[in-house]
Amino acid sequence: MNAEKLSLKEKVGYSLGDTASHFVWDMVGFWLLFFYTDVYGISAAAAGTIMLVARFWDMAIDPVIGIVSDRTNTRLGKFRPYILFGAIPYAILAVLTFATPNFGEAGKIVYAGATYVLLMTAYAAINLPYSALGAVMTDDTYERAGLNTYRFIAGFTGQFVVTGLALTLAEFFGNGDKAQGFQYTVLLFAGLSLIFFFITFKTTKERVQPPKKQVNSLVEDVRNLFNNKAWIILAMVGIISFIMFAMQNAAIAYYFKYYLGRENNVQLFNVIGTVALIVALPLSKPLAKRFGNKNVFIGSSLISGLFFILIYIAGKDNLTTIYVFNIIAKMAYAPAVPLLWTMIADSADYGEWTTGRRSTGLYFSAAVFAQKAGWGIGAAVAGWILAASGFVPNLIQNNTAITGIKLLVSVIPGILYMSCAVFMIFYRIDTKTTALMKKELGARRENE
């Protein structure tokens, strides 16, 4: 029953949920700070504090959502109800977060903080069950790899739209009124998110169920999670990967402005990098079938990290070389994106296989928690390195500051990503193990 191949309709339907998620995640990640300071009129210090507090809240709520969703039992499934009933609050809060009511200086800060925290809560309540849903639609690791490939193609397409079109749409809708432009743009994205999440709910099915005799025990589930060496390795890889992403994303604007002297090219650079990811994502499943999830991830980490490091040696006049190295690095990195989530699902299978207990939501929420921690660490480290190198905004930078900026974009993230390969050497769920787990877990479910 669980081994059946997922239909194209189900893969596409599931993937649209990640497009809907990226509409909000990337609007927040790329434009919310700018919106707070330049549109809503909140001070940069207050805006930064709001985003820091909301990030800590976001991290804290993730395990709660995972634990609750694991204990949800309805005729609609464990995870699908969150997508259906969470879509409307998610869309409404997205619009409210980018609204600009005139409440005075203190009132604006309170309003912005409250709506952002609530939006992140709604995001966690729909996105974490959505991620866990992919693990229970099939128990076949290669079908999961294919499903996650569709997911991330759709997700990065959403990122492409937000990074490449959001400001243009805001200008079009606003016609000189930035507040109105952002409001209408987010309203459009929120409406599309509602439609996409509804399609995800309608087209997907939960097939992998926990053992029928499993008794709820949070203590035992958490103990099993931290005894699962495969999951611990993947969590460490997630932390390191997201430190790398956050560091590089935070520094790339400084790289173009102060080193290359081409500030306006940074958006094009980001868009081309996203396109490179999307183009190479379909290689994930065939490579995994040929070489195994673990080996593909190791190769991806080493090759991608190497080409990130090579960006350092490209002179500021060699813009083509910089673009080429980045494109190759992103294409080499792409197959690992869906495989990380595939292996997290496999680690949940491994937990059930070895302990007789299944807690998919907890596994995914804890993994997301680790990745968000990495994101926060990476952004902070980037700021510390800039400060230590003597960076001063809006001035010509000294050689030390330029070196710090270059290292943040190239060598440091490259070494970090290559180090993921070292952790993955100790990951023991290989092709034979996934096949054996699938066979034995399937037999257990049939006996039940």
Image: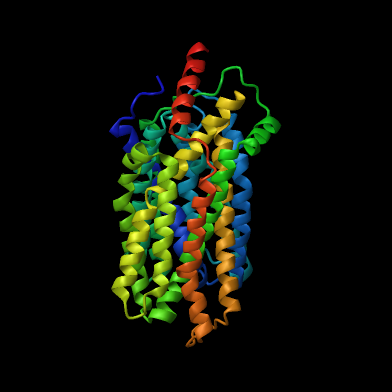
Classify residue 161 by image quadrant. bottom left
In this view of the protein, can residue 265 be seen by the observer? yes
Q: Please tell me which residue is depicted at 61% across the width and 61% down the height of the picture.
A: 52
Rendered location of residue 303, percent (x, y) = 39, 57
Of 352 and 310, which appears nearest the observer?
310
Question: What is the count of numbered marks?
Answer: 0
In this view of the protein, can residue 98 be seen by the observer? no
* 133 over 403 or under it: above or below: above
* 380 over 117 or under it: above or below: below
Furthest-top residue in this view: 447
Of 364 and 162, which appears nearest the observer?
364
Q: Please tell me which residue is depicted at 62% across the width and 21% down the height of the picture.
A: 214
* 259 over 10 or under it: above or below: below
Q: Please tell me which residue is depicted at 54% across the width and 24% down the height of the picture.
A: 210
Of 196 and 30, which appears nearest the observer?
30
Location of the N terminus (image quadrant): top left
Rendered location of residue 194, percent (x, y) = 40, 43
The answer to whether 29 appears left or right of 154 in the picture is: right
Classify residue 288 by image quadrant. top left
Rendered location of residue 46, percent (x, y) = 61, 69
Coloration mode? rainbow
Rendered location of residue 155, percent (x, y) = 38, 49
* 21 over 82 or under it: above or below: below
Furthest-right residue in this view: 219
The answer to whether 410 appears left or right of 161 in the picture is: right
The answer to whether 170 appears left or right of 108 in the picture is: left
